[in-house]
Image (cartoon, helix red, strand yellow):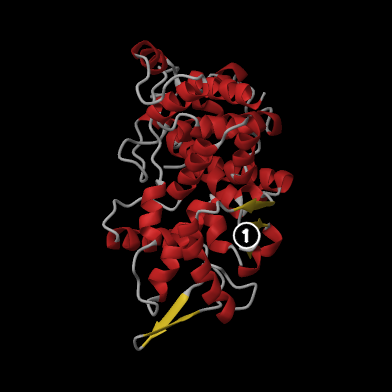
Amino acid sequence: MILRNNYLMTKSYLKYIDDVFQLSHASLDRYWFYIHHLLLWSDDKPFSKIVSIRPTFQLFLSSLDSPRSEHGLAPTTRKKILGTTKRFLRWAKTTHPREFRKLPLYWIDSLRLPRQADITKERSFVSLAEVEHLASLPIPEDNLAQVRERAATAMLYSSGMRPGAFATMPIEAVNLNELSIKQWPELGVKTKNGKRATTFIFAIPLLIKAVDAWDSIVRKTLPPDAPWYAPIDHAWGEHWLSTKLPGKNRSQALNRRLRLLFSAADLPYKSAHKFRHGHAVYGLQHARTMADYKAVSMNMMHANIKITDQIYAPLLNSEVQQRIAGLLGQPTTQPDDELQTYFRCLSDAELSIAIQIAAERMSR
């Protein structure tokens, strides 16, 4: 049973960080998700006396099942939970020094994931072939829902937008003449951490065609501040576009609709976020200089190129091998066996460094 004082203390902490950092509702929900695990683990024991609890907090997190994965909480999620917990407990010691005087700082600092071997994980993403197949599906013009979903797949891939931003993007934010999107919170676009940027769309002809077809429909029917991914009302067999504003769970509805389109295309389902991964893959595969690499990172609205590198550099080992071999003047069709063996032995981090070195060499 969760101790009431523990619960009230976590709520006080969330109010504190909200006041200081002016967080969005989504960010607060995320912090609550992270810190809620500490409440579950501590049960009826005060936070000031949790040192003696067994199993340890790290083992407790490792044993949890996740609703998003059959393999439990991902290592990155556990890392964020531990980081949030450490910051909360330091705040608690500062705010309530008498109550937490026996909770040692060294114990708080010990809350970290155990070191593990570097395991290569291939990231799932929507390929160009898949999105072109989706964007070219023959759909009757009066089936507004599927015409919209077809355009959504094309826009998600070519723009690299996060699903939450895409679902809240108004018509006036889209400029197909300049292939640009104003991901501006003041226009109602729900970006991560309230970031503001004008981003750009890959000029892939088949995808632009699908996007343009839907863009023409919504501009003729709806006001500029209406959602580009417009809700559709229906009654007595008729369908029409609605001016309703996106609800809190709009991005979840987007995934449900995409699942139907994948099924119609006879393709294995991939979530809306996998189109963002596909955008990054396409951009990095076509990058020729560090300036290109930086442009892809900025279009993803990443704070710096290191973030792009960490997430997307370990995409496919075969792609990395071919690209590095090509940049260094080696044949890409039949690489030297010794060179292949060398690249297979590299960790994701080492492959990431190799990409940067090769790209810098190309830019000279």
Residue 328 versus residue 110: which sits nearer the camera? 328
Residue receiving disc 1: 189
Q: In this view, does 120 lie above or below 283?
A: above
Q: What residue type is labelled 1?
A: Val
Q: Quick check: can you spot residue 103?
A: no
Residue 84 versus residue 187: which sits nearer the camera? 187
Position of residue 158 in the picture relative to residue 261 (left or right): right
- Which residue of the protein is positioned furthest toward the bottom in this rendering? 236
Quarter of the image with the C terminus is: top right
Residue 333 versus residue 339: which sits nearer the camera? 333
Residue 354 versus residue 56: which sits nearer the camera? 354
Residue in the picture at 58% in, 53% down? 201
Residue in the picture at 66% in, 32% down? 91
Quarter of the image with the N terminus is: top left
* Residue 120: % across, % down: 39, 25
* Residue 30: % across, % down: 54, 46
Q: Quick check: can you spot residue 293?
A: yes
- Which residue of the protein is positioned furthest toward the top in this rendering? 338
Residue in the picture at 48% in, 40% down? 281
State which quadrant residue 88 falls in. Answer: top right
